[in-house]
């Protein structure tokens, strides 16, 4: 598109209110939420399928954006608190 990468990142942040990296992480967490709700896959498999490179990054991001661990999220969906 003929934009300098730094300028493109600034535009993205101005329009969406978050950096491209934050957007990607939120998207991955949303995918993980969907998989936790619709599959019986274990949490590590879901982390990999959602695009996270490590389980520690996945747990940290999931807790940041969802306020609970992936296991607690799945248990809450099932009504097991």
Image (cartoon, helix red, strand yellow):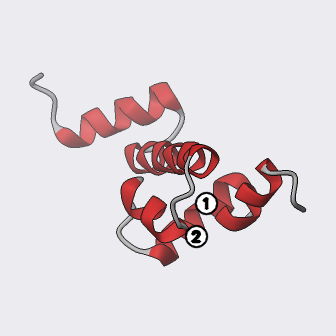
At a point 42% along the width and 53% down the height, the residue shown is 50
Instruction: Please tell me which residue is depicted at 51% across the width and 40% down the height of the picture.
Output: 18
Residue 47, placed above or below residue 50? below
- Of helix, strand and loop, which one carries label 2? helix
Q: In terms of secondary structure, where does tag 1 sit?
A: helix
Residue reaching furthest to the bottom: 56
Q: Quadrant of the N terminus?
A: top left
Q: Which of the labelled discs sits on residue 62, or is there none?
A: 1
Residue 79 x/y as whole percent = 87, 52
Q: Horizontal and vertical percent for residue 10? A: 36, 37
**Is there any visible trace of residue 69 in the rendered image?**
no
Q: Give the side of residue 25 with respect to residue 12, left or right.
A: right
Would you call the spot at circle 2 few (<14 residues within 10 Å), some (14-19), or many (20 or more)? some
Relative to residue 34, is residue 1 drawn left or right?
left
Whether residue 76 can be seen here: yes
Give the CA separation, mark 2 to mark 1.
5 Å
């Amino acid at each position: 598109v003929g934009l300098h990468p730094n300028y493109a990142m600034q535009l993205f942040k101005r329009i969406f209110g978050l950096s491209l990296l934050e957007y990607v992480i939120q998207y991955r967490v949303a995918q993980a939420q969907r998989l936790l709700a619709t599959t019986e896959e274990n949490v590590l498999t879901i982390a990999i399928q959602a695009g996270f490179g490590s389980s520690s990054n996945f747990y940290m991001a999931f807790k940041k954006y969802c306020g609970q661990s992936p296991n607690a999220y799945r248990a809450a969906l099932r009504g097991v608190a």
